């Protein structure tokens, strides 16, 4: 009897110890699991490093920082009318450079040059003149116009210029006619379209253009004579009167005929950071039935530079019809404010008022 009771107790303790051992086994086993009690985590994905910034450089036309890829291409030069009935024009506000010079009929015409900007509306586009073509050739520019003088056609052909001439009205896919405007003031173009069609036609690709100007730093002292108002009296029966007024913001507001000269696309008054007045020998072409004019751009002459509210004098020069215009100050360097430059080509002796 006693032995039976002892055996039963022993069996119970044996079962008890077996259960405790099993529990310890499982507890120890779970404690050795490195993942036990750890919340699952999302895999760590390393972000790729950011791409390097695109290469930049200083524009030789404006002195401003620009994408190198935009500077490594040929400029685009577009002839734009300035008959009073065409104002306001489109695209002048975006041009890096604007050249203004006399044509027949007692008025002036513009050649707007684009390197950085890509305006979608430029015009009205008008006909070429050989002295404008000389400047465009010196800039290695693609030249866009609608017709031209006999002298201009001959010059463009002889020098095999990259040329868009919409005289036949075909459009080339980059000119169109605004039917709300009268001819010949109704043809317009787009700089991106001109570049696209130039590539399709296999026009020679460009490189970084030559440095036209030197540009001063923002804190550089100005040494010229203070001048804040400028008026140019172009000769001719229309007596085109161009004015510039210096502003506290450091640029010049442009006027024509005493009225603000505005941009058709934006409605804003045109502005320039620099104005260069080039004095050039100019004369009527003998025997020309349209009273066209000629001017001697090969050689050198005097210039006035208005920049930063000051007047500087210097010289311009052009070594050949295909060479670029060059500009020198009295101290050897003509330093401009970074930005847009308007170049006013005037006959020697033109009345200029400044104060």
Image (cartoon, rainbow, N blue to C red):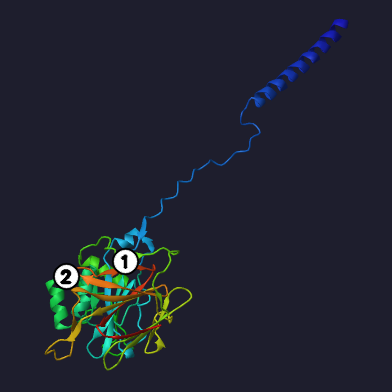
- Mark toward the start of the polypeptide (2 vs 1): 2
Residue designated by label 1: 331
SS type, badge 2: loop
Q: Is residue 8 shown left or right of residue 238?
A: right
Location of residue 163 with respect to 285 vertically, above or below:
above
In this view, the mark in front (2 or 1): 1
Q: Distance from label 2 to label 1 (Cα)?
A: 24 Å
Q: Residue at x 29, y 90 (%)?
A: 182
Q: Residue at x 38, y 69 (%)?
A: 339
Q: Considering depth in this image, is 64 or 302 the residue closer to the camera?
A: 302
Count of labels shown?
2
Q: Considering depth in this image, is 305 or 35 the residue closer to the camera?
A: 305
Q: Residue at x 41, y 51 (%)?
A: 52
Q: Quadrant of the C terminus?
A: bottom left
Q: From the top left corner, tell me how far across and down residue 315 is, in percent.
A: 27, 72
Q: Is residue 196 shown left or right of residue 130?
A: right
Q: Residue at x 33, y 90 (%)?
A: 84
Q: Is residue 286 shown left or right of residue 251?
A: left
Q: Considering depth in this image, is 119 or 197 the residue closer to the camera?
A: 119
């Amino acid at each position: 009897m006693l032995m039976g009771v002892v055996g039963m107790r022993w069996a119970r303790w044996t079962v008890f110890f077996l259960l405790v051992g099993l529990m310890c086994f499982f507890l120890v086993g779970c404690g050795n699991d490195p993942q036990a009690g750890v919340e699952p985590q999302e895999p760590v994905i390393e972000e790729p490093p950011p791409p390097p910034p695109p290469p930049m450089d200083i524009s030789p036309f404006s002195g401003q920082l620009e994408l190198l890829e935009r500077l490594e291409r040929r400029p685009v030069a577009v002839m734009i009318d300035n008959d009073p009935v065409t104002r306001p024009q489109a695209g002048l506000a975006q041009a890096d450079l604007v050249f203004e010079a006399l044509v027949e009929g007692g008025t002036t015409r513009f050649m707007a040059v684009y390197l950085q900007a890509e305006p979608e509306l430029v015009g009205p586009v008008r006909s070429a003149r050989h002295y404008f073509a000389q400047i465009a050739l010196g800039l290695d520019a693609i030249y866009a116009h609608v017709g031209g003088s006999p002298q201009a056609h001959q010059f463009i052909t002889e020098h095999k210029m990259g040329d868009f001439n919409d005289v036949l009205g075909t459009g080339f896919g980059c000119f169109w006619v605004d039917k709300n405007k009268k001819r010949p003031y109704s043809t317009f173009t787009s700089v991106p379209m001109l570049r696209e069609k130039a590539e399709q036609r296999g026009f020679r690709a460009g490189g970084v253009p030559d440095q036209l100007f030197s540009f001063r730093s923002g804190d550089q002292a100005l040494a010229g004579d203070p001048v804040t108002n400028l008026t140019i009296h172009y000769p001719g029966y229309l007596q085109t009167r161009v004015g510039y007024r210096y502003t506290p913001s450091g640029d010049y507001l442009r006027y024509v005929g005493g009225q603000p000269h505005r941009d058709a696309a934006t409605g804003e008054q045109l502005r320039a950071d620099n104005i260069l007045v080039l004095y050039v020998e100019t004369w009527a072409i003998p025997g020309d039935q349209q009273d066209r004019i000629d001017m001697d751009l090969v050689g050198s002459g005097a210039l006035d530079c208005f920049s930063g509210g000051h007047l500087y004098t210097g010289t311009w020069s052009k070594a050949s019809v295909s060479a670029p215009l060059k500009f020198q100050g009295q101290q050897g360097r003509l330093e401009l404010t970074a930005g847009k430059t308007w170049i006013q080509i005037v006959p020697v002796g033109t009345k200029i008022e400044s104060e």
